[in-house]
């Protein structure tokens, strides 16, 4: 692990590149070739899940100072709204990184192999490759110290996709109708949900689309609930993913 003094604050980053500062707030930004900073190429691994599959990642230090580098494969942490971020308390089982820690001088590069060590239990595996670069003399510095955090996607797809979705009872939160949907298949293929909400005042329709990781549940924002009066409603939800189409009917009670 990288040893740092003080607190390094890390917020949610988009898949790509991010800049973090000690005792600061994480900011998202993409660092292009020639702009300096810390670079990784390619930004993602996207392939069929085959035991031993290996991808070579090039890490380049284009900053003016030496950096201590840490490379980790992380599982995704998924919020109820579907936002994803690397789980920094854990490593992604089944993925091996040839070099997890090293130092890069200015303008120096290093090639790191990322390999799928074994067949994933469900046939697929999804996670993040996190690369953090901090100045080698971080412990001797005072004040705000800028470092780099790059996050790329690791996508190992099943040879045969299995689509399986289930929906829980909808709920109203902050004037939005949310439909909790869980993926129990083995693919991150996009999920589309359409709903019909029937009550005493008529029928309302809505929809939402999202990618849901296998084994995860996301509350899809399918409809504005601002105009739903207090009462009992019937919600008919149709879920689609790949070749799958399934319809469920749920009861919704709105309190005002």
Image (spheres, grey):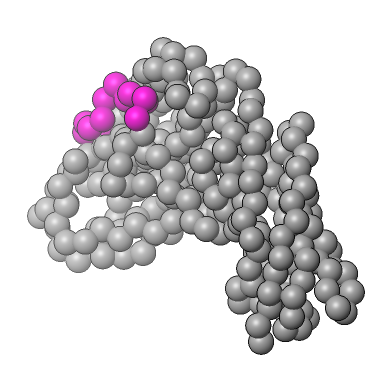
Task: Kindly identify the residue that appears in the image at 79 percent across and 57 percent down.
Answer: 236
Question: What percent of the width, then of the height, locates residue 57?
Answer: 41, 25
Relative image position of residue 58 (x, y in whole percent): 40, 26
- Could you say where residue 96 lies in the image, as x and y percent from the top left? 33, 23
* 34 magenta-colored: no
**Farthest right residue?**
202
For residue 39, say whether it is visible.
Answer: no
The foreground one among 197 and 101 is 197
Horizontal side of 212 relative to 120 (left or right) equals: right
Q: Quadrant of residue 128?
A: top left
The extreme bottom residue here reads 256
What is the quadrant of the C terminus in the image?
bottom right
Q: Nearer the viewer, residue 201 or 1?
A: 201
Residue 103 lies in the magenta stretch: yes
153 or 121: nearer the eye? 121
- Range of the magenta residues? 93-105
Residue 79 visible here: yes
Disc tally is 0
Residue in view at x 66 percent, y 33 percent: 163
Residue 164 drawn at (x, y percent): 64, 36
Q: What residue sits 28% from the left and 47% below the top?
A: 89
Where is the N terminus found, in terms of image quarters?
Answer: top left
Residue in view at x 64 percent, y 46 percent: 166
Say left or right for 128 vs 140: right
């Amino acid at each position: 692990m990288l040893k740092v003094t003080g607190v390094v604050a890390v917020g949610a980053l988009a898949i790509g590149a991010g800049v973090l500062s000690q005792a600061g707030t994480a900011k998202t930004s993409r660092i292009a070739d020639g702009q300096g900073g810390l670079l990784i190429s390619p930004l993602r691994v996207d392939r069929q899940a085959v035991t031993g599959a290996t991808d070579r990642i090039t890490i380049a230090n284009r900053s003016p100072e030496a950096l201590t580098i840490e490379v980790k494969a992380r599982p995704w942490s998924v919020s109820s709204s579907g936002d994803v971020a690397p789980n920094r308390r854990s490593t992604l089982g089944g993925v091996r990184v040839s070099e997890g820690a090293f130092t890069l001088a200015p303008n120096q590069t290093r090639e790191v192999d990322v390999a799928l060590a074994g067949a994933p239990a469900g046939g697929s595996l999804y996670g993040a490759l996190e690369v953090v670069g901090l100045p080698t003399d971080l412990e001797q510095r005072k004040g705000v110290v800028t470092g780099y955090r790059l996050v790329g996607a690791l996508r190992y797809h099943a040879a045969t996709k299995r689509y399986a979705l289930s929906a829980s009872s909808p709920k109203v939160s902050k004037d939005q109708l949310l439909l909790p949907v869980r993926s129990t298949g083995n693919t991150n293929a996009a999920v589309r949900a359409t709903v019909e909400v029937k009550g005493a005042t008529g029928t309302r329709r809505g929809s939402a689309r999202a990618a849901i990781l296998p084994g995860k549940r996301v509350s899809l924002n399918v409809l504005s609930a601002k105009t739903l009066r207090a009462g009992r409603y019937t919600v008919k939800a149709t879920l689609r993913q790949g070749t799958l189409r399934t319809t469920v009917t749920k009861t919704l009670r709105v309190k005002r």
